[in-house]
Image (spheres, coloured by chain):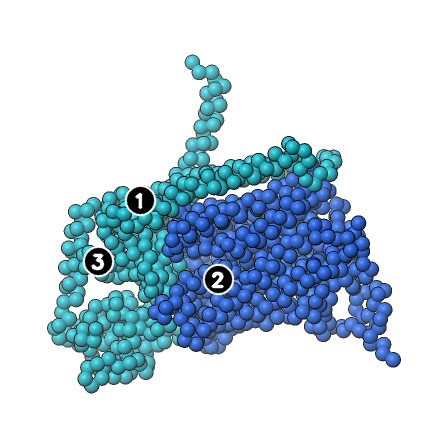
Chain colours: A cyan, B blue
Amino acid sequence: MPHRSCLRAVFSAALPSTAFLAALLPAPAHADFSWNFPTPVTPIGRDTLHMHNEFMLIITALFVVVFAIMIYSMIKHRKSVGHQPAKFSGPTGTVQWLWALVPFAILLFIDFVLMGIPATHAVIDMEDTRTKADLVLKVTGMQWKWQYEYPDSGIKYTSTLSTPREQIANRETKGDNYLLEVDNPVVLPVGKKVRILLTSTDVIHTWWVPQFGVKRDAIPGFLRETWVRIEEPGIYRGQCAELCGKDHGFMPVVVHAVPEPEYLAWVDEKKTELAAAAAGSDKTWSREELLAKGKDVYGKQCAVCHQPDGQGLPPAFPPLAGSKIVDSPLLSPDGKLLKDSHVDRVLNGKEGTAMQAFKNTLSDNELAAVITFERNSFGNARGDQIQPAQIKALR
Amino acid sequence: MSNATSADHGSSHAGHHTHGGHYQGGVLRWLTTTNHKDIGTMYLTFALIMFFVGGAMILAVRAELFQPGLQLMQPEFFNQLIGVHALVMIFAALMPAATGFANWQIPLMIGAPDMALPRINNWGFWLLPPAALLLTLPFFLALFGIGDGAVATGWTLYAPLSVQGGIGVDFAIFAIHILGVSSILGSINIIVTIFNLRAPGMTMMKLPLFAWGWLITAFLLIATIPVLAGAVTMLLTDRHFGTHFFNAAGGGDPILFQHLFWFFGHPEVYILLLPVWGLMPHVVSTFSRKPIYGYKAQVYSFIAIGLLSVVVWAHHFFTAGMPVPALLYFMYSTMSISLPLAVLFFCWIATMWRGSMTFETPMLFALGFIVLFGIAGLTGLVLADVAADAQYHHSYFVVAHFHYALFAGGIMGVMTGVYYWLPKWTGHMFSEKLGKLHFWLTVLSFNLTFMPQFFLGLAGMPRRIPDYALQFAEFNAISTVGAFILGFSQLIFAYNIWRCVRGGEKASDKVWEGTQGLEWELASPPPHHSWEVQPVIK
């Protein structure tokens, strides 16, 4: 029969330690008062969590020990309790030198051995993007959305925030995944090492999914790499993590991790979907078809800056209503691109501004439709239209 | 016969309003003064005003962040407020405050009648108000349809976003140039003063620690401000003169900007902190009635930190994609700064150990600083870990860390100095009751504001976003409440200072019971030319 005081000692140690450990456990992704990283689902994510917990324990211990000493001193060495001041101004004698140098040595050990060695292993592992990679995902950051490309499968699409502006403007109740939902998420197979390549078309963005433990900058003109092996199926959400302009807070990352067969089925489905969207670029579209689709594209892609009413936010985002660029010929007489024309602006963007080259992200149908829509809305009445086939010829 | 240039300013007159006619009165006095005490006062007053300007900006930000959704402002304006808040707090509040201390205290502490270069001193200050105007003017110009507001890239001005930005970026670049010149002028003055005007018998190893702290700071400024100036000039030419330093299409690299900026940016944080680390030992020693512990160790630590600070910059952009050897080098070098820093903590605590402590307002702030800055240092150690930094980088964890460092460290350190030296400067004691109230309100609301932000970062909230997902709502609300209490509590500080300047219980020369050092041998306030008879140190 264990001694009662032993039981009490064990119990009184167990309870606070359990509470402490509970605080160290990662929180479910939607907790309201979460105290730690969300549950990791990749090897890097788990490594990172373990290191973080270990380091937080170390620094908490350091904090408690050092400030316990300080608080002890504040209580004991007070004038009001009559403590007389000593006169030393440095270590005198061997014991005091030890008191000074041993903490220094302990910190050296903590830094370079206790923290440094696991960190070094984790870094080397984290940067090893190429060993046995099963597939490649290319991520392109843009103001203000992501574009995903699967080079092996020939799929490319953009992923834009799908939270309605009414929710952001507090006119509608916010959904559960407010600001963390997109129209076209990334889909990846569980259990496969995915090598992720990143770049950008305009400014620096950063791709971050906390549950993957992965954050990497997307830099215009350069390719960066990272990797994930997602171990659990699920939906994982993250955000852009580098200030990239006005909608930096509105370009989330959503990844659906599914078992491999589902992934392969999705690839086929997506290929078909994209082919269908691009199809019809050879047929002749009616004016109504162009305007309807154009309105849809405008709402999703252009209204963010040029505003739903086409008034823009000058000087950064010029108005389309009464714009000289819109109110100019579509193409040259022989069907070629005119520099600084409406078509040029939409297809090729404007260097040094937030106006991106939409030929990289929109299909021929979408481009033709939105250009037609802009020329016939907001008080603009050019009356003309452009066909997807004409856009295709310009590529 | 001229009575305008009286030669008898050797004898101190009762007040410092007129000195045999060679001293101006009114506005012209302040515009043309070359007196280190007047200039120190101007730096400190400017810093206090800009502290409230920067504070008002961030209260607007915190109000927007009180709840999910956009309630008060559009994201474009939000981005302007956060960037200008940082630039104002760093360049227009903390640095001028520290320079105000340097101006007031260094001549008094080393037995000099003034700074070595008094006219440069005047110019160094008067560059600041125009620079502050340049920084904030774009806000007002936008109201009249000129430009689209102030710089909206954050204080870090990363290219290519800053190449894209409107005229606010240009105004910020010019403001930074002017602020940089002011810092360099001040630094030259401080170095020359410390090297040349010490009283006989004051060897370098008898120089007060506050002066040592500023000496290292001054060298760091001279070494790194030119690099910042270069970086923002390259940004200016990329924006307007067709260069492509930061544009890959022209053979440049956006990351070059980050290297250049942070080569300045990291030493900058030690520039902000070293003056405070220099003044802490004086305060702790005074209120423990015990000599400063480990004077030499602290001097060597300052030097070590100064040297290390210039070789660790890339820890600010671990996620930008550097080679593994670079990541590991910067991780280990960053961690090694914890060693001299630990020496400083050890010495502060060893100074109070077995002393005879009382807890007047300066000591309260000093103790609060040591504890809260300790949190900053420890979380900095954790941030140095490259692998875990993948989670912390550009999240609210970093925001919390640097506010513990720069508010609990920098600003509370400045408050320590103000409470410590205000009676010497004004000749009056401040209200101890108001001082204590200010301390407790500040410490409690500061923690309420920033402790939740560590957990927001861990939960996955990025920085610099005007709106956030629902799971971040509770901690954001708490943080905003804390921020408003923190902001309004500072009015107590301003009031206490204003009251003290105008009158109060007369302060003795020594002011506090345990003071040591030359400055406490002068009257409170000191005579016009401070040390009119040069002291000799045994």
Helix, strand or loop status at disc 3:
loop
Instruction: Please tell me which residue is depicted at 50% across the width and 38% down the height of the picture.
Output: A109
- Quarter of the figure with residue A100: top right
Q: Are marks 3 and 2 on the same chain?
A: no
Helix, strand or loop status at disc 2:
helix
Instruction: Estimate the x, y position of residue B508 in percent, counting from the top left.
Output: 79, 52
Q: Amino acid at mark 2?
A: Phe
Q: Are marks 3 and 1 on the same chain?
A: yes
Instruction: Estimate the x, y position of residue B230 in percent, counting from the top left.
Output: 50, 68
Q: Is residue B191 above or below residue B130?
A: above
Q: Amino acid at mark 1?
A: Thr
Of B16 and A88, the residue lying toward us: A88
Helix, strand or loop status at disc 1:
loop
Instruction: Please tell me which residue is depicted at 45% across the width and 73% down the height of the picture.
Output: B237
The chain that hosts pointer 2 is: B
Circle 3 residue: A151
Q: Residue furthest bottom?
A: A333
Q: Residue furthest left?
A: A283
Using the numbered discs, state the Cα–Cα distance from disc 3 to disc 1 in whole angstroms. Answer: 23 Å
Q: Which callout, 3 or 1, points to the residue nearer the camera?
A: 3
Q: For residue B472, say whether it is visible.
A: no
- Quarter of the figure with residue B531: bottom right
- Residue B261 has which mark? 2
The chain that hosts pointer 1 is: A
Image quadrant in which the N terminus of chain B is located: bottom right
The chain that hosts pointer 3 is: A
Using the numbered discs, state the Cα–Cα distance from disc 2 to disc 1 in whole angstroms. Answer: 34 Å
Q: Which circle's residue, 3 or 1, is located before the other in the chain?
A: 1
- Residue A42 has which mark? 1
